[in-house]
Image (cartoon, coloured by chain):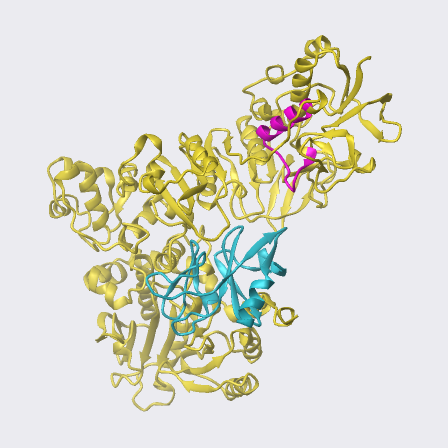
Amino acid sequence: MGKRKLVVIGAGMASGRVLEHLTDGAPDAWDITLFNAEPRGNYNRIMLSPVLSGEKSYAEIVTHDDAWYAERGITCRFGEHVVAIDRATKTVTGQQGTVAYDKLLIATGSAPFIIPVPGRDLPGVITYRDLDDTNAMVAAAERGGTAVVIGGGLLGLEAAAGLALRGMRVSVVHLMGHLMERQLDEAAGYLLKKDLEAKGIKVLTRASTKAILGEDRAEAVLLEDGTTLPADLVVMAVGIRPETRLANDAGLSVGRGIVVNAQMQSVSDPDIYAVGECVEFDGHLFGLVAPLYDQAKVVADGLIERENAFVVRDVATKLKVTGCDLFSAGDFRDGPGREDIVFRDPARGIYKRLVIEEDRLVGAVMYGDTADGNWFFGLIKDGTDIEEMRETLIFGPAYQGGNPADPLSAVAALPPEAEICGCNGICKGRIVAAIEGGAVDLGAVRATTKASASCGTCTGLVEQLLQVTLGDAFRKPAAQPICGCTDHTHEDVRRLIKTMPLKSQEAVWQELGWATRNGCHVCRPAINFYLLADWPLDYQDDPQSRFVNERRHANIQKDGTFSVVPRMWGGITTPDELRAIADAADKYKVPTVKVTGGQRIDLLGVRGEDLPAIWADLNRAGLVSGHAYSKGLRTVKTCVGTDHCRFGTQDSTGLGIKLEKLLWGSWTPHKVKLAVSGCPRNCAEATCKDVGIVCVDSGYQVGVAGAAGMDVKETERLADVPTEQEAIDLTVAFIQLYRENAKYLDRPYKWVAKVGLDWVKARVVDDLEERARLIAAFEVSQGIYRKDPWAEHAATKAAGYAPLADLTLEAAE
Amino acid sequence: MAWLDIGALEDVPLRGARLVRTRAGCIAVFRTAEAEVFAASNTCPHKGGPLSEGIVHGTRVTCPLHNWVFDLETGAAVGEDARIATYPVRLEAGRILIDGTALSQRSAA
């Protein structure tokens, strides 16, 4: 019997492994013809990244050279596309002619997915799949300029890292909220982003590509949000799909890939095998090299007529994005009954998360230190009972019984020039020097450096520095952490957000060693406020970190309905506004209409899904949100002042309206209520407000830090000023100082009690430069919030107020 | 199981929730991570608070009325002897599917 004829389509890593097994196991059994669309044989595709970055040459990554094929008598038809497979005559037709087969192996791999945007066909837009793509990128990089990589998965990031190493300015545009979302969770994605940004790569997440712009070639990438990114080169790396066109045309069963049985034979034709990324088995597709090599062994055994069957195994991904260490294995996402163990070491940029189900490890994500990855992978694969080592599991095999993460590491990692005391401008280096010079307790540090000697909010950090510097010799007094997610106090976190600096929630969770995935209902709203207050231009408000009232722009009531309070500037309204309120109350069957203590009208008992509609109705009459739900400015209560009152000394109503128009929509640590009275008879009850102004003949008495709630407290006099403008300036500066320094959910009176009125006066009243800075900072951060959230939600977010689905009919069937 | 399509994953805000009306009562669908969803009763057993309006953290939700915390994986209240019903959900091609059989069993019960 002569040799049987085997035709192989595709010379990739999977079919290459088949040929190795086959020519070793049965050297003379088969007459082999190998087609490859690329004009070359099998090379190690995984090593294309080092070729792109210039660390390796093509010659170094060749697996099978011409001599290898020649020794085995393989007929190579490289650079030739296969046109058709004819199953009736058992032939394969290439561009140069037809060849017959007894058995056929399809190994066409995968094709890059091209997103269907205008401009995708322009020159200068390339994919990242093979050596030709790599060479095209190298050539483009030699011309320099700017590259945009669309896709923040493994392939896209490799392309970005390689192009950056070759000197291009690179941006990565990624559709999802964090990089490599299929392999990494948010925390690891954050660390990866940070490492890439440190390499000069710009990363844009939640960014959807709208078009590629350019006349004769790609010049820029346009995003859905209107951002334009200049681009001399656009790399599209959004994903791959199995290349199944030939199999489809030949009438083989094709799902997402070519459907095969456990012997890797097409389920439609036992003479046709398929292997590698083009294959679908048992609903699975394959991209990693380990299962492909398993498949290759099964194919070779089939051709040599040995028994073998392919089984899907759990595979760990140990990934390397040029210089960043990451690892993920198993299933770290969905599923009931699961529990997390999280370890973060901010100083070393390490994050580890283990997912446990019924005393067994089911998933692991690691970043920065992946040394124990294989050990964890073994535990996942073997289903080892980890109950006994649960407490120390995350420290790895070599560290059973180890110490928990060091809460001091964030402070230890700060550079000497990091500012610790904002009041006195004292940096870490000076404090450490003072401690080493003999200032071994808080009082001594205060006396020598002035650090923590003013407002005191950095006291916790100074104590941590004492502890880091002196070790066990210093005993820190117990401080109250924000919540169970962290050992840090509010004051520490605020100060570290400013100095480290930390500009995102993920940065806070990671750098400060949070023990939970994304905080809890206690700490997350606080962190959201601190980030918003300290980094107004970098941080975007996260509605999901706000209490329902602020997210829904209405106050939730005990029965789940909401209340609606339209704004009445300074408490002034008109007959038209009152008619609109009355009409809305009728139309939406509002059960209770009440006048509030802050001179507004409250519509109580509105159904959540009616909110956008009632707001739209009120908007039409010129009414806007009264922010009766916000940790922000609530109301400015006024008396009628000089307009009507025979005792009025100044235009208290006018001043109240001016203040309200300036301050409305702002976010503060807790709610803020103001009042302006036109004379000392004080009909607006200004002396128990957060800021209360009493008009007198000579001008304005500005009082702050009053209270009339859980505590009752008269305001303290901040200053007496002669002009209305100065009264406004002092009010704005005071509120901005409160925004920058207070603990979340401390009303101004509590905060002033902690820092002292003198400290506040020094900044708001006496230091004119600081007063001007505070006013400017308020404008920068709060100017954009001076708009009606009701109008915005009614126009663009109304769908979110309705149920996602109504299954009452389906469920009845 | 009869899987019912209740909407797109992207229609539920990350670390947020949406309401689904069923014969078994209102159900909240929570999105705890990019591709992680849970479904549970919308009603807090304490005072009936709407859990879909709560703050979602980790795989937990906090009731907006009095801060009871529920583990969405088990339905158990943290530190309280109470629990909410949970329902199987899964994701397929960006859609959220809920187990209709579990829903009708609850409404029959």
Q: Is residue A195 visible?
A: yes
Q: Quadrant of the C terminus of chain A?
A: bottom right
- State the residue in front, B50 or A247: A247
Give the magenta part as a residue range: A278-301
Q: Quadrant of the N terminus of chain A?
A: top right
Queried whether the magenta region covers residue A287, the answer comes back as yes
Rendered view: A324 above or below A560: above
Question: What residue sits 31% from the left and 39% below the top?
Answer: A392
Queried whether the magenta region covers residue A568, the answer comes back as no
Q: Is residue A225 visible?
A: no
Q: In the displayed structure, does residue A241 sit left or right of residue A475? A: right
**Residue A644: quarter of image:** bottom left
**Residue B98: quarter of image:** bottom right
In percent of width and height, residue A578 lies at 50, 87
Rendered view: B95 above or below A591: above
In percent of width and height, residue A526 lies at 35, 58
Question: What residue sits 43% from the left and 32% below the top?
Answer: A373
**Residue A311: quarter of image:** top right
Rendered view: A7 above or below A378: above
The hue of chain A in the figure is yellow
In percent of width and height, residue B61 lies at 42, 61
In percent of width and height, residue A55 lies at 54, 20
- State the residue in front, A326 or A473: A326
User: Who's cyan, chain-wise?
Assistant: B
